[in-house]
Amino acid sequence: MHDIVDLEGRGIPSVYVASSEFKAAGTAQANALGYDPAAVFVPHPIQDRTDGEMRDIARAAVKDLIKAITSPAERR
């Protein structure tokens, strides 16, 4: 989260990706930092996924990632 805040502060559009299990933790961290970052959540868990499953997850997230990275913060 600190990296996203830093990048955005330098004018670099950013989005973080996390598995759905970490949505509440990400929200809590963002609130603690006073920031509302763009985020995309993918299915949990990911650590035991095959390469093929990870490619499928990535393909499924691409449109959301593009939308998140190209949308002005006030429209997220």
Image (cartoon, rainbow, N blue to C red):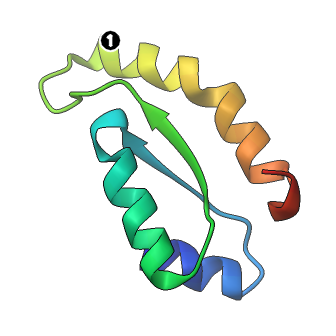
- What is the total number of numbered labels drawn onto the structure image? 1
Quarter-wise, where is residue 74 in the image?
bottom right
Kind of residue indicated by mark 1 = Gly
Counting from the top left corner in percent of width and height, residue 39 is at 56, 50
Q: Give the answer, above or below, for where 52 lies relative to 46.
A: above
| Residue bearing the label numbered 1 | 52
- Residue lying farthest to the left in this orientation: 48
| 56 with respect to 75 (left or right) | left
Q: Is residue 51 above or below residue 35?
A: above
Dot 1 falls on a residue whose secondary structure is helix
Say which of 72 and 59 sits in front.
72
The quadrant of the rendering that contains the N terminus is bottom left
Q: Residues within 10 Å of mark 1 (few under 14, many from 20)?
A: few
The percent coordinates of residue 70 (x first, y second) are 83, 50
Res 10 → quadrant: bottom right
Whole-percent x and y of residue 33? 48, 83
Q: Nearer the viewer, residue 42 or 25?
A: 25
Question: What residue appears at the point 27 percent right and 38 percent down from the top-left corner?
Answer: 21
Kindly identify the residue that appears in the image at 27 percent across and 19 percent down: 51
- Please tell me whether residue 33 is drawn above or below residue 36 in the rendered image: below
Q: Residue 60: x and y, percent? A: 55, 17
Residue 53, image quadrant: top left
Horizontal arrangement in the rendering, residue 47 relative to residue 66 (left or right)? left
Q: Please name the residue shown 12% across and 24% down the image.
A: 48
